[in-house]
């Protein structure tokens, strides 16, 4: 509804017509002009709002397409794979070794399972990390990551089309799922207006969080699939 029924009823009470039914006042032309301007304003606001939402998705699309082009143009994605392993591992350590908790409260078993799921060689044992500080765990992980990419087996694999295909297939699949999730957020974004939150700002915040989650999931899946290739 563009207009409140009460406002329409009030206008009707003010209308004066002649014996033939022609409206004499309020002036019909002025009323029609005001209505037209109000409708145009509503449509403009709606278009402006939708454009802001589309810009959020477009910025994410540019990031993904840039990554995809880099993967297609690179002859050897070793550096990309090593960067993926290091950044993902450090993120896992940062999440599991929460600075707000003492070391005894960290879930070392969960930490080890996640790190071993992405490390291609030299899996962690519980005793290796028990009693260690966060910086010591980070140092040990970085050493394992460095050692992994010194192995000829992994270097050769990174030069093959298999790893490129793993990256591209995993990227495309996760991106499609992300777009579906973003569409769901967009469809429900007007609900935020009821909580006095700007819908556009809410979409930007939720969209960024979803994008970050997608990147993390994407990187973990890629690293796990590379590990499986090495085991074949």
Image (tube, rainbow, N blue to C red):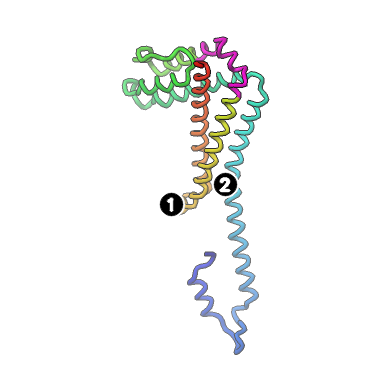
Compared across the picture, whether 135 is left or right of 53 comes to left
Q: Is residue 180 magenta?
A: no
In this orientation, which residue lies closer to the viewer: 117 or 97?
117
What residue do we see at 53% from left, 19% from top? 229
What residue do we see at 58% from left, 42% from top? 56
Q: Position of residue 150 (x, y in %)?
A: 55, 10
- Residue 162, quarter of picture: top right
**What is the tally of numbered marks visible in this picture?**
2
- Residue 44, quarter of picture: bottom right
Q: Which residue is mark 1?
A: 195
Is disc 1 placed on a helix, strand or loop? helix
Answer whether residue 201 is visible to the viewer in this image: no
Q: Is residue 160 magenta?
A: yes
- Furthest residue in direction bottom, as rendered: 19
The answer to which of marks 1 and 2 sits earlier in the sequence is 2
Q: Give the distance between the C-alpha atoms of the residues marked 1 and 2, in whole angstroms.
A: 19 Å
Q: Position of residue 18 (x, y in %)?
A: 60, 87
Give neighbour class at mark 1: few <14, some 14-19, many 20+ (Cα, 10 Å). few
Compared across the picture, whether 107 is left or right of 76 comes to left
Answer whether residue 126 is visible to the viewer in this image: yes
- Furthest residue in direction left, as rendered: 104
Mark number, residue 53: 2
What residue do we see at 57% from left, 31% from top? 171
Magenta extent: 145-164
Majority secondary structure in the magenta region = helix
Mark number, residue 206: none
Q: Position of residue 34 (x, y in %)?
A: 61, 69
What residue do we see at 38% from left, 16% from top? 133
Compared across the picture, whether 66 is left or right of 88 comes to right
């Amino acid at each position: 509804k563009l207009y409140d029924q009460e406002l329409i009823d009030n206008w009707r009470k003010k209308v004066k017509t002649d014996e033939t039914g022609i409206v004499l006042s309020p002036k019909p032309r002025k009323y029609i002009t005001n209505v037209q301007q109000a409708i145009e304003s509503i449509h403009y606001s709606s278009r402006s709002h939708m454009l802001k939402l589309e810009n959020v998705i477009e910025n994410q699309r540019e990031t993904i397409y840039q990554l995809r082009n880099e993967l297609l143009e690179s002859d050897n994605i070793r550096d990309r794979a090593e960067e993926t392993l290091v950044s993902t591992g450090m993120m896992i350590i940062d999440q599991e070794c929460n600075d707000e908790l003492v070391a005894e409260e960290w879930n070392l078993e969960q930490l080890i399972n996640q790190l071993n799921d992405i490390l291609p060689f030299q899996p962690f044992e519980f005793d290796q990390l028990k009693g260690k500080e966060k910086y010591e765990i980070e140092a040990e992980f970085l050493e394992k990551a460095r050692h992994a990419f010194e192995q000829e087996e992994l270097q050769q694999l990174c030069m093959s089309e298999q790893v490129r295909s793993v990256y591209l297939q995993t990227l495309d699949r996760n991106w499609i799922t992300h777009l579906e999730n973003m569409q769901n957020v967009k469809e429900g974004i007007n609900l935020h207006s009821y909580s006095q939150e700007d819908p556009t700002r809410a979409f930007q915040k939720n969209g960024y969080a979803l994008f970050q989650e997608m990147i993390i999931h994407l990187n973990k899946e890629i690293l796990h699939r590379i590990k499986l290739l090495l085991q074949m």
